[in-house]
Amino acid sequence: MKLLVIDTALGACTAAVFADGGPLAVRFEPMAKGHQERLGGLARDVVAEAGGGFKSLDRIGVTVGPGSFTGLRVGLAFAQGLGAALDRPVVGVSTLDALAASLDAEDRPVAALVDARRGQVYARLFAAGAPLGEAQALSLQEAAQRIADLGPAVSLIGNGATVLTEAFPDLAFSQRDDRVAPAPQALARLTADRDPVSNPPRPLYLRAPDATPPSRLPGQSRQTAA
């Protein structure tokens, strides 16, 4: 199977082509913003380097979150548009699942953590490679407690790991990986393994948006207190 994977949900812009589990072309650029300007060029470059053109792709994978609202939408819109144009299935991949899959840690528990700000992390815990429940937005206190319950052999991965261990310096863990985004190889593996029907490219939001609707319409006069 030949596939294109795309990730713009966190702190990098990734586009990579894999075939039968092996990388043909990979572009990975750390960035906090600017994904929209870079993604199209990176996708073009990896497809050209891999050979065969876009029509040779069998499947497209894209991260669906949690992550940056703006970055997330960039990747999803690009992947869905490309999938529609090529008539190829698009697989949605959880950012937290891909982070966990970036570690070679099937023999120990893993906590995938993304900084959600406001004293929270987006988290999903794993043991023996299997998830222990759904992804959630947790307070730092609650996340620290759940990780402590897994024991000191737990591995932490994601930018939320730094936030958590700075808040709780006594938290016991065996490994901390502060990477800004999932490994392209992990994205490819999950894209190949998962059913496109049950893993659609829909955004995964674990918390209500910070923005609130306006209290009045444009041009509408302000109401004065009685």
Image (cartoon, rainbow, N blue to C red):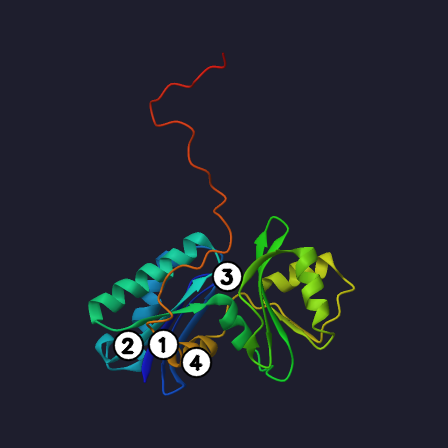
Query: Which residue lies under the disc numbered 4?
Result: 189
Q: Nearer the viewer, mark 4 or mark 2?
A: 4
Distance Cα–Cα, label 3 vs label 2: 25 Å
Q: Give the SS element for disc 3.
A: loop
Seen at 35% across and 28% down, the residue is 217
Q: CA distance from mark 1 to mark 3?
A: 27 Å
Q: Nearer the viewer, mark 1 or mark 4?
A: 1
Crowd rating for badge 4 (residues with CA inside 10 Å; few <14, some 14–19, many 20+): some
Q: Residues within 10 Å of mark 3 (few under 14, many from 20)?
A: many
For the image, the number of numbered tags is 4
How far apart in space, not on screen, are marks 4 and 3 (Cα)?
A: 20 Å
Mark 1 belongs to which amino acid?
A: Asp
Identify residue for label 2.
48
Q: CA distance from mark 4 to mark 2?
A: 21 Å
Q: Residues within 10 Å of mark 1 (few under 14, many from 20)?
A: some
Q: Quadrant of the N terminus?
A: bottom left
Q: 105 left or right of 218? A: right
Name the residue at the right extreme: 170
Task: Return the x and y of residue 151 as percentages of the image width and height.
Answer: 73, 74
Q: Position of residue 174 (x, y in %)?
A: 71, 76
> Can the viewer see residue 48?
yes
Q: Could you say whether the residue bearing mark 1 is in a helix, strand or loop?
A: loop
**Quadrant of residue 121 in the image?**
bottom right
Nearest-to-viewer mark from 4 and 3:
4
Q: Decide which of tag 1 and tag 3 comes sooner along the chain.
A: 3
Q: Which residue is mark 3?
A: 11
Query: Which residue carries the number 1 mark?
Result: 195
Mark 4 lies on a secondary structure that is helix
